[in-house]
Image (tube, helix red, strand yellow):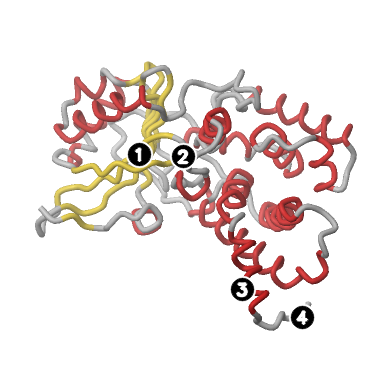
Amino acid sequence: MSERTATVADEDLGELLDQYRSQLTGYCYRLLGSSHEADDAVQDTMVRAWRSYDRFEGRSALRSWLYRIATNVCFDHIAQRKRRERPMGLGASQAAEERNLGEQLSEETWVEPVPDDRVLPRDGDPADVAVGRESIRLAFVAALQYLPPKQRAVLILREVLRWQASEVAELLETTVPSVNSALQRARATLSAQAHYGSAPGADGANLPTTAVDEDKNELLEKYLDAFERYDMPALVALLHDEATLSMPPYALWMQGPVQIERWMVGPGAECRGSRMVPVRANGTFGFGQYRISPDGGYDAWALQVIDTADGKVVGINAFLDVEAWYPLFGLPLHLDA
């Protein structure tokens, strides 16, 4: 494949292609379960499209052409590695008295967090925005990883992005009946993953009540206040009976308000006095958590992504690899006193 010569037309093409970067990043993130891999896949897609645009010649819609390239790039990524997971998918919960976090597993093990503004539109139809938020929840993205690549792509394109079956069939170079069959099998597989939740439906009928909206601000403020004061009774009052606490890159996780409180006042007691900086992550709210530094001020400790449902916190996902996540979310690694 020959390199294109840089021209004014190429500059215009670059701007045209870049208009699709955010939506392609969201698509690749859902397919891959990794924000870093999604960025790489989209960059690869853009390079391939730029180099081969002369042969495109408008034979199909530009959007469809770019999604076809991105799909093939992602399928190549998926073929080269194991399924990404969450700690809850790797084994049973453990008691809070377990002070050993265990082995630190590699980055490739985990479904990764993603900033909302990298993968979601800033405005648009409220139903589309709601489906978009639900479809980047950590639990849903983890459930997608259980699907074969084709089924994964079909479900995202049909149920999340609302493509017609004929459009999906053209992209995947298959038939409409094949697309419909793949969608049915994908939905059946997700239904079996009950601990992850159901797929968000295009009509909103299957949407869990976890998307961020104005009603969630009160819960966010209560969680922030309770955590910074390290008021465990107040924090526990916000937790669902089946709430979980996990800490990638470690497989250790706990379930239930009793175990979470015991961890917070036991092995996790050094989090007392933390400062929290709110962020938007995975369609819900999150925080950059900073612990007191012996040198003064506060040092980055964890990126917390908070899962919610029906007015309660159902998951505290604390990603401890701050050097990987804080720059992605625009957070500094240190706060002054």
Answer whether residue 114 is visible to the viewer in this image: yes
Q: Residues within 10 Å of mark 4 (few under 14, many from 20)?
A: few
| Residue at the image point whose x is 71% and y is 56% from the top | 66
Q: Quadrant of residue 167?
A: top right
Q: Which mark is residue 286?
A: 1
| Residue at the image point whose x is 30% and y is 29% from the top | 220
**Contact flag, marks 1 and 3 (Cβ < 8 Å):** no
Give the amino acid at mark 3. Answer: Glu
Label 1, label 3: how many angstroms apart (C-alpha)?
A: 37 Å
Q: Which mark is residue 11?
A: 3
Label 2, label 3: how many angstroms apart (C-alpha)?
A: 33 Å
Which badge, 4 or 2, is on the more N-terminal residue?
4
Q: Which mark is residue 282?
A: 2
Answer whether residue 262 is visible to the viewer in this image: no
Residue 122 or residue 154, whichever sits in front: 122
Q: From the viewer's perspective, is residue 17 above or below residue 125? A: below
**Contact flag, marks 1 and 2 (Cβ < 8 Å):** yes
Label total for image: 4
Q: Residues within 10 Å of mark 2 (few under 14, many from 20)?
A: many
Q: Which mark is residue 2?
A: 4
Label 4, label 2: how many angstroms apart (C-alpha)?
A: 39 Å
Label 4, label 1: how many angstroms apart (C-alpha)?
A: 45 Å
Which badge, 1 or 3, is on the more N-terminal residue?
3
Q: Nearer the viewer, mark 1 or mark 3?
A: 3
Q: Is residue 36 left or right of residue 144?
A: left
| Residue at the image point whose x is 61% and y is 59% from the top | 42
Give the amino acid at mark 2. Answer: Asn
